[in-house]
Image (tube, helix red, strand yellow):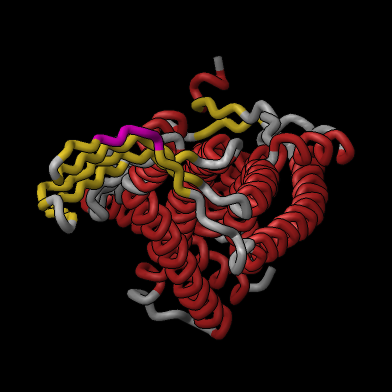
């Protein structure tokens, strides 16, 4: 080793020592003056979050009111029309006899054709069923959306924390390097690499923070809380069991899917409407007692029962029958189309769920921890001059990419599993426990 090489080595050694000391001090100062975001935010579990949303979501009142309205229609459908009372009063004159008072009173009750009221009740009962199915579907979708947003919020918080951790390392290095006069081309280029990487990392941290805020805003809206309210989601330990076979899932979807149940209820309801339209070809009639009296010399009194029946000569309700039959055909077509769409969606989500499980099965349980330790080790040794800049930067990036891949894959697996549960109505037994409970 020549003299110039020895001087260069000593100079690099002193620079590495100064970088280590100053970098550690800067890190301690930054940690003391800048607390992590959301430190004072309350910690919420996924189950508690879902329960709160299902209890306080404002939109639930719409579906409850829809059920109440349908029950009101059912009460109206089974109520008879009010009877009608009519009266007349006048004077009657008979030549050669004289005149006197003539009056009459009658009451009539409209009688529907047999079978008409039960058909109206059946239509109203189907409307209640549709409203209840709509509420159940909304509750299930709301719970699934809340879980997905909770996991998304946690993933964004973890991504932002990891990105800030690596960005702080590059920032502390950059702050030390810019204070010293770099000797030679290599230190200058390394400084530029560190500056460029720091800018990229800050941008990634900003994107993660934006995703976090978007999920938080939607969660606050769903649970009816102020938009500015903050919270943190407790680390969910997801248990994602294998899904059933595609044939079993398709069979369950055909029976339990909310959309298909509603389409079947609509088709059945439309069948009742066709029967009602045909029944209305026969007119309703009115029947009731009457009493009349005349006083023109002698008193004449009449008591009897009157019947009023319209003659169905011009209107046989053909237009309403054709309309109801066309609506029935539309309902049958909608059911067929919805069934095909549900089958396709079940197959797609099942393949997606299995693909995510297969991807997660290849991971080592401590992969992220090992990458985090390697990134920290590379940071220490780069400051000592034992690790080249390319290895240092690559390790930091790989650590962040591993964290993002782990969180994104788990989130996507959860979303696919919940979509399967919504489509099939079958629970996959996806559990959500805290990391502490998982360790126990």
* In this picture, residue 95 sits left or right of residue 52: left
Figure quadrant of residue 51:
top left
- Residue 280 lies, with reference to residue 178, above or below; the image says above
Q: Nearer the viewer, residue 214 or 381?
A: 214
The residue positioned 31% from the left and 56% from the top of the image is 26
Left or right position of 255 against 36: right
Spot occupied by residue 147 in the image (x, y as percentages of width and height): 51, 41
Q: Quadrant of the C terminus?
A: top right
The residue lying furthest to the bottom in this view is 185
Q: Position of residue 401 (x, y in %)?
A: 63, 57
- What x and y, as percent, mark residue 60? 38, 43
Quadrant of the image occupied by residue 254: top right
Query: Is 211 rendered above or below residue 136?
Result: below
Front residue of 273/38: it is 273
Numbered marks: total: 0
- Residue 410 appears left or right of 182: right
Looking at the picture, does residue 49 appear above or below residue 227? above
Q: Residue at x 16, y 54 (%)?
A: 92
Q: Quadrant of the N terminus?
A: bottom right
Magenta region: 301-305
Q: Does the rendering let one see residue 2?
A: yes
Quarter of image, res 181: bottom left
């Amino acid at each position: 080793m020549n003299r110039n090489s020895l001087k260069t080595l000593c100079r690099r050694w002193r620079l590495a020592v100064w970088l280590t000391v100053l970098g550690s001090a800067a890190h301690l100062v930054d940690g003391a003056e800048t607390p992590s975001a959301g430190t004072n935010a309350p910690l919420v579990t996924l189950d508690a979050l879902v329960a709160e949303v299902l209890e306080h979501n404002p939109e639930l009142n719409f579906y409850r009111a829809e059920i109440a309205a349908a029950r009101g229609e059912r009460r109206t459908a089974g109520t008879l029309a009010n009877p009608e009372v009519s009266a007349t009063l006048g004077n009657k004159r008979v030549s050669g006899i004289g005149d006197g008072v003539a009056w009459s009173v009658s009451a009539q009750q409209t009688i529907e054709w047999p079978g008409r009221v039960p058909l109206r009740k059946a239509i109203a009962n189907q409307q209640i069923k549709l409203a209840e199915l709509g509420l159940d579907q909304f509750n299930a979708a709301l719970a699934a959306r809340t879980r997905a947003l909770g996991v998304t919020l946690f993933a964004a918080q973890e991504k932002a924390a990891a990105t800030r951790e690596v960005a702080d390392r590059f920032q502390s290095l950059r702050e030390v390097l810019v204070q010293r006069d770099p000797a030679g081309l290599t230190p200058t280029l390394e400084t530029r690499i560190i500056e460029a990487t720091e800018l990229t990392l800050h941008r990634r941290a900003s994107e993660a923070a934006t995703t976090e805020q978007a999920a938080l805003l939607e969660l606050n809206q769903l649970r009816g809380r102020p938009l500015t309210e903050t919270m943190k989601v407790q680390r969910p330990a997801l248990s994602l069991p294998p899904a059933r076979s595609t044939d079993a899932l398709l069979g369950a979807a055909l029976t339990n899917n909310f959309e298909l149940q509603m389409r079947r209820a609509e088709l059945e309801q439309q069948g009742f409407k066709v029967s009602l339209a045909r029944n209305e070809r026969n007119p309703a009639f009115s029947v009731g007692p009457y009493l009349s009296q005349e006083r023109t010399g002698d008193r004449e009194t009449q008591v009897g029962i009157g019947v009023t029946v319209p003659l169905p000569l011009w209107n046989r309700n053909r237009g309403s029958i054709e309309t109801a039959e066309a609506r029935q055909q539309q309902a049958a077509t909608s059911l067929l189309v919805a069934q095909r769409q549900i089958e396709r969606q079940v197959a797609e989500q099942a393949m997606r769920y299995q693909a995510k499980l297969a991807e997660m099965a290849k991971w080592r349980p401590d992969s992220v921890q090992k990458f985090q330790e390697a990134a920290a080790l590379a940071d220490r040794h780069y400051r000592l001059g034992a690790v080249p800049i390319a290895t240092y930067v690559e390790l930091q990036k790989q650590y962040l990419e591993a964290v993002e891949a782990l969180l994104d894959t788990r989130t996507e697996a959860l979303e696919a599993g919940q979509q399967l549960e919504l489509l099939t109505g079958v629970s996959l037994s996806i559990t959500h426990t805290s990391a502490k409970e998982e360790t126990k």
